[in-house]
């Protein structure tokens, strides 16, 4: 079984209490034993330093001058920059800000606004700044601090995301894709729905095996090849999530990919459809990459997405459906993928067109990178059959909308 990625925790304790006096904080040890990395901010040392006290636990000693900023509710750019450096160096993408003292309010508000991290405030019996209550995603009573309940609440405050993957043979790529999801997805609340279009290799056997191993995986085995559009529609109708991500099986995801895409949908009310940047696409979603093999991809993705944090490119005309995210309610408004398009061409053009026609924007998230091998299924068709299907689907698109299709310009 692949080791599942866990979200990180930035722990902001009572300001007047040093870590050595907090060492019996059972919540911290519960979380690190569950595989979460915990970064604990402490004022017990005169000098800035990070000390790894045990696996997954990092105690970060802050300068005393930062204490004064915290105690008097003053923002401190130097402190913000220092913590942002920790976030970058440790590739912190999916994270909970666990706060025990409302004096941290300005700092955690800044981190929430910039990184979209969720805030959990542990309420104590003393004066509380009401602002921390307003910006917190969850407030818990110290006297009712049951660790299993907290963990379940963390899952609930992250809205359920349904990942839909359609497969047809090519087991090698499917396995790599699904392994990358489990290894690199720390988002706490997601399900995977895999729809197989009657594969003739060992794909169905593999899919049923992982369905048994993982409680958040659902496998649907079709008795015939329904194609890309209908395969995805079957998965979408089965999905329970508030958000839907359509993901090709010839992709490899990176850390923070779900939270990165969902963040933009949460922040931009008029954003209907969002996708990542990639190494392989037929439009502006494709960027120049410097890695030569998949082993070096994560390092490149980390650097590129950090530089482009929170940046959206809205000049893109359509999103290729190797990876796209949307609210599930969008399907109620504009309908599902058009099943008149055969084998996986022009469904994405058509869907993007309908999203914009309904008054929504589409955008490419420059702070999310997904590796895409590209056109794996099409390569098996042969060039003659490929262009036959291309022309048929192009004709369907042009007749449907009474427009002349031109690559990225319609």
Image (cartoon, rainbow, N blue to C red):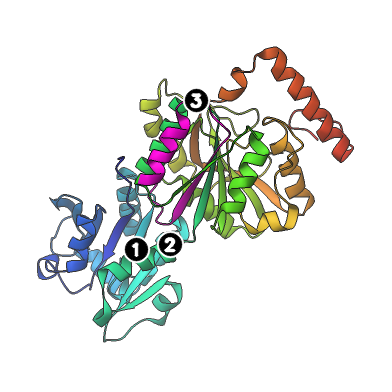
On the image, the x and y values in percent for residue 113 come to: 47, 61
Question: Taking 57 as reference, is 167 left or right?
Answer: right
Residue 127 found in image quarter: bottom left
- Mark 3 crowdedness (10 Å alpha carbons): few <14, some 14-19, many ≥20: some
Label 3: which secondary element: loop
Residue lying at 74% horizontally and 23% vertically, measured from the top left: 389
**Which circle, 1 or 3, is nearer the viewer?**
3
Question: Taking 149 as reference, is 173 left or right?
Answer: right
For the view shown, which residue lies furthest in the left direction? 20
Sequence order check: which comes first, mark 3 or mark 2?
A: 2
Q: Is residue 41 above or below residue 253?
A: below
Closer to the camera in the image, 215 or 150: 215
Q: Is residue 272 above or below residue 378?
A: below
Sequence order check: which comes first, mark 1 or mark 3?
A: 1
Q: Is residue 228 visible?
A: yes
Q: Is residue 319 visible?
A: no
Residue lying at 42% horizontally and 24% vertically, measured from the top left: 291
For the view shown, which residue lies furthest in the front direction? 223
Residue 210 covered by magenta stretch: yes
Give the quadrant of the C terminus.
top right
User: Could you tell me how far apart the alpha carbons at marks 1 and 2 are, in whole angstroms?
Assistant: 8 Å
In the image, the segment drawn in magenta is: 184-212
Give the residue pinned by disc 3: 170
Closer to the camera in the image, 138 or 400: 400
Residue lying at 58% horizontally and 38% vertically, measured from the top left: 222
On the image, the x and y values in percent for residue 53 come to: 12, 53
Give the residue pinned by disc 2: 112
Give the residue pinned by disc 1: 97
Asked if the residue at tag 2 contacts the one at tag 1, i.e. Cβ–Cβ closer than 8 Å, the answer is yes
Label 2: which secondary element: helix
Residue lying at 12% horizontally and 69% vertically, measured from the top left: 24
């Amino acid at each position: 079984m692949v080791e599942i990625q866990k979200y990180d925790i930035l722990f902001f304790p009572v300001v007047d209490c040093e870590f050595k006096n907090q060492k019996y904080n059972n919540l911290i040890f519960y979380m690190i034993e569950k595989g979460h990395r915990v970064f604990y901010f402490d004022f017990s040392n005169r000098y800035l330093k990070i000390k790894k006290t045990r696996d997954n636990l990092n105690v970060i000693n802050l300068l005393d001058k930062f204490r004064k900023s915290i105690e008097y509710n003053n923002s401190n750019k130097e402190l913000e920059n220092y913590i942002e450096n920790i976030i970058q160096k440790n590739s912190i993408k999916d994270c909970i800000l666990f706060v025990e003292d409302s004096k941290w309010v300005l700092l955690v508000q800044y981190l929430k606004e910039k990184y979209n991290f969720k805030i959990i405030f542990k309420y104590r019996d003393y004066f509380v700044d009401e602002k921390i209550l307003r910006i917190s995603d969850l407030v818990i009573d110290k006297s009712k601090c049951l660790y299993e309940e907290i963990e379940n609440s963390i899952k609930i405050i992250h809205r359920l995301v349904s990942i839909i993957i359609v497969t047809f043979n090519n087991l090698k790529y499917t396995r790599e894709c699904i392994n990358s999801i489990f290894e690199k997805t720390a988002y706490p609340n997601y399900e995977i729905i895999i729809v197989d279009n009657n594969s003739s290799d060992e794909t169905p056997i593999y899919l049923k095996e992982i369905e048994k191993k993982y409680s958040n995986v659902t496998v649907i085995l079709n008795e015939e090849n329904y194609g890309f559009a209908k395969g995805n529609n079957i998965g979408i109708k089965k999905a329970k999530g508030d958000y839907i991500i359509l993901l090709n099986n010839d992709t490899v995801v990176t850390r923070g990919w779900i939270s990165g895409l969902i963040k933009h949908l949460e922040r931009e009310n008029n954003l209907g459809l969002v996708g990542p940047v990639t190494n392989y696409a037929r439009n502006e979603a494709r960027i120049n990459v410097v890695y030569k093999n998949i082993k070096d991809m994560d390092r490149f993705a980390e650097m590129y997405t950090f530089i482009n944090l929170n940046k959206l490119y809205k000049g893109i005309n359509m999103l290729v459906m190797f990876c796209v995210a949307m609210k599930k309610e969008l399907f109620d408004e504009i309908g599902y993928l058009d099943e008149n398009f055969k084998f996986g061409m022009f469904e994405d053009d058509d869907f993007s067109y309908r999203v914009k026609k309904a008054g929504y924007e589409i955008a490419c998230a420059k702070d999310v990178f997904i590796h895409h091998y590209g056109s794996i299924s099409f390569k098996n068709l042969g060039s003659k059959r490929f262009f036959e299907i291309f022309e048929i689907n192009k004709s369907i698109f042009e007749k449907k909308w009474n427009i002349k299709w031109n690559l990225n310009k319609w």
